[in-house]
Image: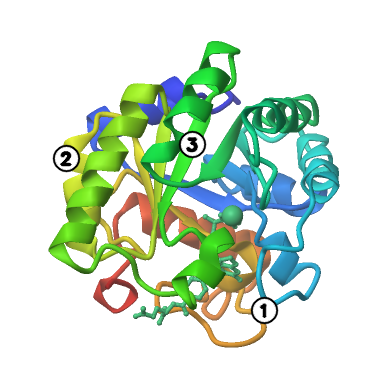
């Protein structure tokens, strides 16, 4: 049971063998997902929606993410543990550093931050202090009010070029991973081509290195409108453990995402 490391994910990219990621918020599901082969567990601020019942992620606090990160870490999963910096936890460089430290002390192996090119200074400061960073780009849900809804990003050629340029900037700043949410599959493929770090996608098509979904979505238990990129893996399986294995297998054989899940 060798633990998943960033160098393993880098090797996946080099070998062109996709890896699987899933959100996790507690010890029980984290243990199940890890045993099913899921490589990365994200304590996502999506917990504000699927656990707390909010209609956005903005109400989630540092205490919330710390609490759930501790619960996931107690499962001692084989998976790499990544935790989201919630809304405004990166209001200043100092708060970015101190809040990221709290996530690492709660048991995370790395942090994820939403943003664009302007994240470079924060990423540099974190990486200098030994905290690996995933840069979450494209549809960044903490900016839902600025976007005017959960809309596909990078649709115009200007927006696509900016995304590619900013991904390069954040890689140079030291980002270990890039996560792209809700972008046209060709834009995701172009971003992946432009950088050398592994790229994780959600609603970003199959031409990336890793896939991620919110656990409740892939078990078909989320409330409300289901985004296009979601697939219910429990619908055809007899147990949650089997649904996790089916998702892991589908990602690793590139049978998920299919055309109908892409923009
Ligand atoms: N349960 C859950 N699943 C998620 O994937 C998720 C969360 N919560 N909370 C945080 C964000 C919000 N996310 C969302 C929510 C809705 C869409 C959505 O409905 N998108 C439209 C795109 C419309 C367009 O511009 O074409 C879609 O049809 O999928 C996308 C991402 C992703 N994240
Ligand atoms: C959807 C993923 C990428 C996320 O950021 C979350 O679950 O909060
Ligand atoms: Mg998030």
Q: CA distance from mark 2 to mark 1?
A: 35 Å
- The numbered disc on residue 221 is 1
Q: Is residue 108 above or below residue 86?
A: above
Pointer 2: what residue? 193
* Mark toward the viewer: 2 or 1: 2
Is residue 230 visible in this depiction of the protein?
Answer: no
Q: CA distance from mark 3 to mark 2?
A: 17 Å
Q: Nearer the viewer, residue 184 or 76?
A: 184
Is residue 163 visible in this depiction of the protein?
Answer: yes
Q: Residues within 10 Å of mark 1 (few under 14, many from 20)?
A: few
**Residue at point 64% right, 35% down?**
92
Q: Where in the figure is residue 230, as x and y percent of width and height?
A: 46, 73
Q: Where in the figure is residue 193, as x and y percent of width and height?
A: 16, 40
Q: Residue furthest front?
A: 92
Asked if the residues shown at circle 1 and circle 3 are in contact, with their CB atoms under 8 angstroms apart, the answer is no
Q: CA distance from mark 1 to mark 3?
A: 27 Å
Q: Quadrant of the C terminus?
A: bottom left
Q: Count the marks: how many? A: 3
Q: Residue furthest left?
A: 157
Q: Residues within 10 Å of mark 3 (few under 14, many from 20)?
A: many
**Residue at point 85% right, 45% down?**
63
* Mark toward the viewer: 1 or 3: 3
Pointer 3: what residue? 134
Q: Residues within 10 Å of mark 2 (few under 14, many from 20)?
A: some
Q: Where in the figure is residue 224, as x and y percent of width and height?
A: 62, 87
Secondary-structure class at tag 3: strand
Q: Nearer the viewer, residue 71 or 44?
A: 44
């Amino acid at each position: 049971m060798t633990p998943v490391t960033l160098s393993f994910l880098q090797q996946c990219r080099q070998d062109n063998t996709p890896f699987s990621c899933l959100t996790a918020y507690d010890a029980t599901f984290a243990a199940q997902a890890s045993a099913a082969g899921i490589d990365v567990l994200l304590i996502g601020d999506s917990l504000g929606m699927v656990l707390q019942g909010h209609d956005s992620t903005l109400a989630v606090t540092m205490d919330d993410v710390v609490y759930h990160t501790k619960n996931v870490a107690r499962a001692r999963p084989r998976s790499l543990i990544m935790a989201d910096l919630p809304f405004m936890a990166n209001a200043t460089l100092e708060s970015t550093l101190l809040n990221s430290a709290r996530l690492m002390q709660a048991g995370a192996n790395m942090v994820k931050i939403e943003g664009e090119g302007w994240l470079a200074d924060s990423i540099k400061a974190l990486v200098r202090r030994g905290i690996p960073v995933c840069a979450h780009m494209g549809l960044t849900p903490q900016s839902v009010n600025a976007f005017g809804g959960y809309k596909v990003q990078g649709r115009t050629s200007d927006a696509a070029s900016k995304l590619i340029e900013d991904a390069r900037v954040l890689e140079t700043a030291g980002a270990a991973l890039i996560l792209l949410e809700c972008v046209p599959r060709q834009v995701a493929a172009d971003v992946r081509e432009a950088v050398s770090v592994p790229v994780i996608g959600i609603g970003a098509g199959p031409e990336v290195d890793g896939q991620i979904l919110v656990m409740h979505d892939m078990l078909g238990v989320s409330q409300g409108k289901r985004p296009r990129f979601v697939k219910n893996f429990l619908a055809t399986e007899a147990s949650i453990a089997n649904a996790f294995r089916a998702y892991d297998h589908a990602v690793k054989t590139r049978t998920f995402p299919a055309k109908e899940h892409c923009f």
